[in-house]
Amino acid sequence: MMVYTLGVPSWVIPGTYAENLRFLENKKEVTGVELLFFIYNDEIRKQLDSEWDEICTFEKRFVFTAHLPDVLLPSHDELVARLAPLVSHFIVHPPKENQAALVPILAEWVKKYNVKFLAENTNPGLLEAMLPHLNLVSHNTGSPARQQQFPETGIGLCMDTGHLLIEGKKPADFFRKYREHIGEIHLHTVNREQAAIDGRLADHRQLRKNEPWLIELLSLLGDFRGTINLELFSWQEASDSMEIISFYLPH
């Protein structure tokens, strides 16, 4: 029986939030959707306003999470307030400078909206600089992801495998070290050769069968109760990756 939530981003086909949700609705293997807000401007706000009622109709179909803007500001309180009743948790990137400054902002939102945040490993050293200022909490024990109870304060972690691979680190080592604090895994691989051809990022590439790092990590995830998010921006790539992990994980 699958105990983790298997998710994809809200952009796996060209289109809006609602158009992607309609596309994913009959994909039974997908149980979660990460609503992407890498930026939040007037255009995104208008789209969210126009589609909000329809997005909310999918609340019982998907476990929603939200990726907050890369540069998180106090003014994004508006976005957090809107999404708080809908999403299981929020993903945040540590700032590139003064990582401690983000912590009181998150703490205020935790208390104000009763929401949960997971800090993601991004560029080398940023999460590590933020960790001493966090009250890390356990996000990977107890009940399944839909029913997880998060403490009133404290932050968990989001492990991004592509970012670790680019640094030359083993995702399995990161998972072993922080497993009790990891509530979500962004699962994707690195393909530098293909990136040199198509000009896309080297990471956020579909999984490849028999990659040693992947086999080692998946062997540790049999009882993982958080979200596994195939952070790939193509349905074909996400679907092909699902077939690979289905060989190793219960579903």
Image: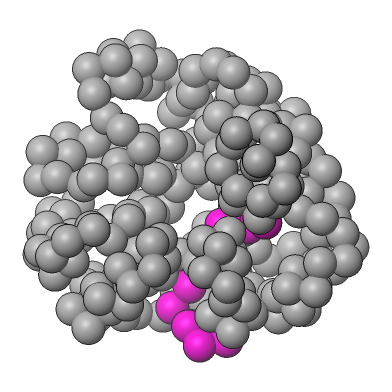
> Residue at position x 48%, y 73% from top?
182
Where in the figure is residue 57, as x and y percent of width and height? 50, 26
Left or right: 190, with 152 as reference point = right
Q: Is residue 187 one of those drawn in magenta?
A: yes
Where in the figure is residue 3, as x and y percent of width and height? 68, 66
Left or right: 74, with 214 as reference point = left
Where in the figure is residue 20, as x and y percent of width and height? 59, 23
Q: Is residue 31 above or below residue 143?
A: above
> Residue at position x 60%, y 33% from top?
199
Q: Give 33 or 175, whichever is nearer the viewer.
A: 175
Which quarter shows the N terminus? Answer: bottom right
Q: Quadrant of residue 8?
A: top right
| Magenta region | 176-189
Q: Is residue 152 above or below residue 46?
A: below
Q: Is residue 94 visible?
A: yes
Q: Is residue 61 visible?
A: no
Where in the figure is residue 95, as x and y percent of width and height? 23, 58
The structure's colour scheme is one colour
Q: Is residue 73 one of those drawn in magenta?
A: no
> Residue at position x 38%, y 62% from top?
123
> Residue at position x 64%, y 23% from top?
13
Which quarter shows the C terminus? Answer: bottom right
Given the current orientation, which residue lies at the most extreme bottom position?
Answer: 177
Q: Give 88 or 37, whichever is nearer the viewer.
A: 37
Count of numbered circles in the view: 0
Q: Is residue 35 above or below residue 141?
A: above
Given the current orientation, which residue lies at the most extreme front position?
Answer: 196
